[in-house]
Image (cartoon, rainbow, N blue to C red):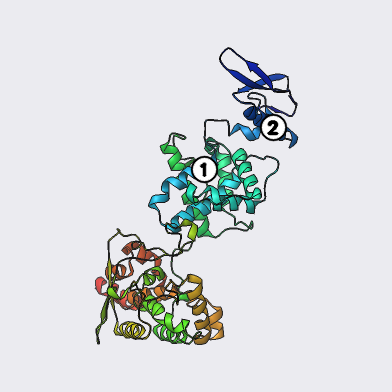
Amino acid sequence: MNTTYDVKFWEIQHRVGQKTSSYIVRWTVGRFGKSKSFRTKGLATAFLSDLRQAAKQGEAFDLATGLPVSLLAANSSEPSFLEFAQSFILRRWRTLAARTRETDAYAMLSLIPALVTDLPGRPDDEALRAVLREHALLPEKRRSALSPELDAAMRWLQKASLPISKLGDAATIRMALDAISVTFAGKSAGANTVRRKRAVLHHLLELAVEQKVFSSNPLDGVKWSAPKAATTVDPRTVVNPDQARQLLDAVAKVGRKRGARLKALFACVYYAALRPEEVAALRETNLTLPESGWGLIVLEGARPQATKRWSDSGETHEDRALKHRAKKDTREIPIPPALVAILREHIEKFGTAKDGRLFRTAKEGTYSSSAYSYVWQEARKLALTPSQVASALAARPYDMRHAAVSLWLNAGVPAPEVAKRAGHSVDVLLRVYAKCMDGQHDHINNKINRALG
């Protein structure tokens, strides 16, 4: 692109023909005269004002088109990266869960502000992310009114965003990969975060291939390795049965009422290996709780937590299908007498919500992850030694699920049955819990010895 800063403007001309009249904007770029006609004086005045403002801000003007760099993308038939990203997010909106929508948008908060031309007057990064989060990446009916600051940020992004075709250049792809490799504070991002954001970028570029923008995915042509992410459970996080019981007893002692109401929730995570979002959806009708012996949970769905702006209902929790399963699919988990007794006691003490849910706040809502995580950390202080509290042992409520699955595998329960109860595929189960399958070396060695004769 050949550009210059040598620009001059002339007064708007009004031309009257036999049937129509027009208003002509005239200017020169270098030694080349340029003009553009408009039907109304207001449109012509606005266009001339944009040109003057660009020159005042020190923008270069393209010799071929006569336009400032900031207006080139807006006047091209090709969508900008911002426009394509908006289209990508909104076309997937209807079919995705709220948390997946949030993951898509979170990747765009890194990518869109990075894939821009260097125009004067760039807003700060927080303003750019705010206008994307609260306006540009939401369906039109959900968008909030923009403050003057965010309106300016939106207009700057619309002018500065690179054409989508620029991602066909290896240098631009590397800019994108650099952007997803750091946090908003500029530090190295976690491996899982980088891998998730790269996956979103890959899906976006696959859409561009589908729409004939590219003949193949530009990411495939760049040699770049994602950081290694831990895919196995750390055995140091796994509690033994005695420690699990001590933690559950300690939960009931946290606070005046909240801990007591949450003991059964954590017990479901440990004894039935339920995910927290599955426990949140648990209703009395899902339970078979005999007076003695084993009981049964028949899971029908989950209530994952997400930010309100990304959910269909505008609430933080929504009813969804079970993870990786069809809409009306269910999962059966036999539960030991210890959990049966805890659930029977919970229902007797606290009853259920109007819709039958077992675990709800005083206002019939669903406990947030921050609320039950706080209770969990307080329980760890009561049940564990100071060195254990400082360690990774049961550091998160989810680690109780890891403890359950590890216990089942080490007890000799066949992997397909463990996978069925935990809601995993067998290959994922064995890969994720490979390091937690301890205590079987002698048994395996004896089998090999017998095979060798």
Q: Quadrant of residue 299?
A: bottom left
Q: Position of residue 415 (x, y in %)?
A: 30, 69
386 to 402, vertically: above or below: below
Which quarter of the image is occupied by the N terminus?
top right
Q: What residue type is labelled 1?
A: Val
Observer able to see residue 219: no
Q: Which residue is drawn at 27% across and 65% down?
A: 330
417 to 261, vertically: above or below: above
Judged from the image, the secondary structure of the residue bearing numbered disc 2 is: helix
Q: Position of residue 45 (x, y in %)?
A: 67, 29
Which quarter of the image is occupied by the C terminus?
bottom left
Q: Do the residues labelled 1 and 2 touch (CB within 8 Å)?
A: no
Q: Which residue is drawn at 38% across and 80% down?
A: 264
Name the residue beneath numbered marker 2. Answer: 49
* Mark 1 or mark 2: whose residue is earlier in sequence: 2
Name the residue beneath numbered marker 1. Answer: 222
Q: Which amino acid does label 2 sit on?
A: Ser
422 to 192, vertically: above or below: below
Residue density around tag 1, few if under 14, some if 14–19, many if 20 or more, within 10 Å: some
Q: Where is residue 29 in the image (x, y as percent from the top left)?
A: 71, 24
